[in-house]
Amino acid sequence: MAEDNKAEVTAGMRGASWDARLMQRPFEMVPYALGTADGQRTLGFLFSVTGKEKGVVCIMHPREIAITHYMVPAVLDAGWACWVQAPRSPGNDLRLEHEIALFDVAAGLNHLRAHGFEEIVLLGNSGGAGLYTFYNEQARSAPEQRIAKTPGGRSTRLAELQMPVPEGIVLLSPHPGQGRLLMVGLDPSVLDEQDAMSCDPALDPFSRANGFDADKGVGRYTPEFVAAYGQAQRARVERLDAQARRLLDAKGEARRRLKQGSATEQDRRVAAHAPIFQVWRTDADLRAWDPTLDPSDRKVGSLWGRNPFVSNWGSVGFARVVTPESWLSTWSGIASNASLERTAPAIVQPTLLIEYTGDQCTFPADIQAIRGQIGSIDLSFERIRGNHHGMALAEGERPGRELASEVVTRWLRERAGQFASAGR
């Protein structure tokens, strides 16, 4: 296929780095190793130009670390400091529970408040949107009303956590949450979770019989197939949820017998065991291969590229290896608490929402849903040509990230000093 027709790989923070020329300026970057309230560690990097900024913009992703995120220069241009934070286990979401990840966010915001910042804006890019909107929703809840247990049954202790409330929110190419993203990307033709090759032909998204042309790498799916496919995707999530809960129930029963003094030798092993399982074929969103579904400026392909046989059956992909706890909290489109549908209504602060019109992860209907879910009456919305990380869609075209950076810089400049009164 022609080079300019290839979908660039933008999964995670791939392609989200700044243009180094934009940082050829006097600035200071100070790293901080922070302790969290639950005894873990997280890293943060504070960028500033004058060292006297009163406002700071935070950038964080639950799985990735993007120290050189392309929005850092835009934030500095606005006269704000920029805080880029790493999760406690960057690059590894094996045990990622979003409720516990909020302790990392809180450590960063408490540090920034102690540092003297009066205005904090959370910039959630891609999966960072789900993390930050979840944090904001819990921070704005009375401690006794915060989530007490993770979907896997672990005590969160969020009621005891000091959670500073941010003054503003920026959502940059957000998706509906990691679980919701995965649910529409799951291949529902999987018949046996232990067999990556098992397949129900009636639901196979990459068969010619169902509308996929392997030679062209493009699908054309009927409304009937799309409807059945969506129902089957939810059913697969339900099966995976049940599998995760069975593993947790077995471990819980063994632990109870251990505490009661009636445990067998096998119980001792099960009580200590941390189950891990694989989830195959997670890159099969029909919209990625059929551009007539929820049409936009996007190229054919997913966040992982143009070849679904590599991304759907390969070793690298979303939720490929999980624990029962991380599946239920992060990747289940049913059990996870970190969906924007649940958390966006709690956003009452001034908010900027930016859509890239060629996004191959968040489609137009997703953005319109998110826009309608946000609770703030002070909502600015911008549509800009670009792919998921604002790269140019055509040769010679100005990258969308440059236009988005200008929007963010202008929005921050116009509102500096006004967030505290507007967002409370």
Image (tube, grey):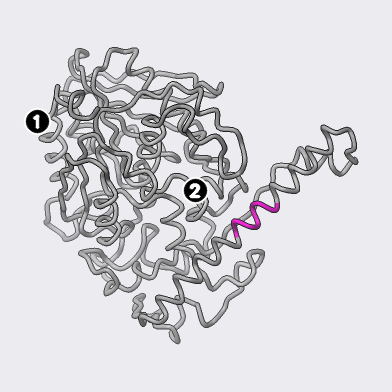
Instruction: Say above or below: 238 vs 381.
Output: below
Instruction: Say above or below: 350 vs 293.
Output: above
Q: Is residue 317 visible?
A: no
Seen in the image, is 192 located left or right of residue 228? right
Q: Tell us which disc is closer to us: 1 or 2.
A: 2
Specify whether residue 280 is painted magenta. no
Mark 2 Cα shell of 10 Å, populated few (<14), some (14-19), many (≥20): many
Q: Which disc is residue 336 wearing?
A: 2
Amino acid under disc 2? Ser
Amino acid under disc 1? Glu
Instruction: Say above or below: 120 vs 394.
Output: above
Secondary structure of the residue carrying tag 1 is: helix
- Kindly indicate the quadrant of the structure image that contains residue 118: top left
- Kindly indicate the quadrant of the structure image that contains residue 296: bottom left
Q: Position of residue 12 (x, y in %)?
A: 39, 47
Q: Which residues are magenta?
A: 240-246
Find disc 1 in the rendering and name its residue: 414
Q: Residue at position x 55%, y 65% from top?
A: 236
Q: Residue at position x 12%, y 39% from top?
A: 406
- Judge by depth and name the residue closer to the eye, 405 or 364: 364
Quarter of the figure that contains the C terminus: top left
Q: Position of residue 393 (x, y in %)?
A: 19, 59
Mark 1 or mark 2, earlier in chain: 2
